[in-house]
Amino acid sequence: MAVTLRQIQAFLAVAEQGTFTKAAERLHMAQPALSQLVRELERELGIRVLDRTTRRVELTEGGREFHGAALKVVQDLDTAVQNANGLAERRRGRIVVAVPPLLAAVIMPPTIVALQEKYPGLQVAIVDARSDLVVEAVRFGRADCGVGTFSALEDNIERSPLTRDSLMLFCGPASRFAAREAVLWRDLAEEPLITLTRDSGIRLLVEVGYESAEITLKPAYEVTQITTALALVEAGLGIAVLPTYARAVAPASVVARPLAEPSIARDIVMIRPSGRSVSPGLSAFETLLRRFVRQLAPSEES
């Protein structure tokens, strides 16, 4: 069966207007062309849908039955088109974002607020999880995108760099480093270090810094959360080497200083499944996210 939308629209117009003349005027087409569309529809359906009289056109029994279904088809299509237009114009939609907990806490609230102010119909759902689970959620379609720092070896994902984030020294106000503008890695020798556990990518970068400075890393405390490390620093129990964006949740008394020789940085990126188109809503979200990420972890270039 090859019933077309144009045939259905012609039939509905005649049924509503009651005459071929008025229906043709409504559809801005010639009456013979309209009559031809109705005949083609009847041929495809195998029944007459209209009874033609000299004064008025009326629905047959089969036409009345077909009318309800045909009207629903057109209404559903109109709704689908309106919804698609709404998505294209970023008026509606839902975005699922996977992001590690601390990064989620510092960048997601302002980004979502800005998004809702500009596009009230867009909704954002957050999956706060470890970096490996973020990648898994994106790869298997449980999240539209992920934000964080990820291994370059991860496959089946596409990356969009947002900014570069450098490691910084965090210390208490009484620390000998608090008054300095910058701190050298080699100066950390013999300092009580509060560090993350070895399943953290940050810990691995800290080890690179210690090895480059040719000093021994002997943690005074190993914790799993950045906020815990900052609390220990605030209590005067040692120093910590953490990403720049940790400043957003650091206690007011904790001082952050750049680390040099070497300067160690990593990319904060947005990841998406490979080969999947970017929705207008996600594009709008990425634009706002980039702004707030750069405010929290400004790179030298930005």
Image (cartoon, grey):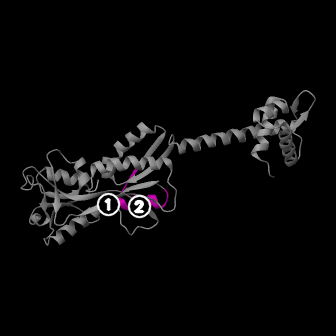
Residue 14 visible in the current orientation: yes
Residue 143 position in % (x across, y down):
46, 54
Residue 131 is inside the magenta segment: yes
Q: Position of residue 225 (x, y in %)?
A: 26, 55
Q: Position of residue 136 (x, y in %)?
A: 43, 61
Could you say whether the residue bearing mark 2 is in a helix, strand or loop?
strand
| Mark seen at residue 234 | none
**Mark 1 Cα shell of 10 Å, populated few (<14), some (14-19), many (≥20):** some
> Which residue has dot 2 on it?
159
In this orientation, does residue 200 appear? no
Numbered badge on residue 267:
1
Q: Which residue sits at x=52%, y=42%? A: 89
Q: Which residues are magenta?
A: 126-141
For residue 212, what is the image quadrant?
Answer: bottom left
* Circle 2 residues within 10 Å: few <14, some 14–19, many ≥20: some
Three-letter code for the amino acid on which mark 1 is drawn: Asp
Q: Position of residue 140 (x, y in %)?
A: 49, 60
Mark 1 residue element: strand
Count up the numbered dots: 2
Nearest the viewer among 135 and 282 is 282
Q: Amino acid at mark 2?
A: Arg
Q: Are marks 2 and 1 in contact (CB under 8 Å)?
A: yes
> Which residue, as the protein is rendered here, is positioned at the far right?
54
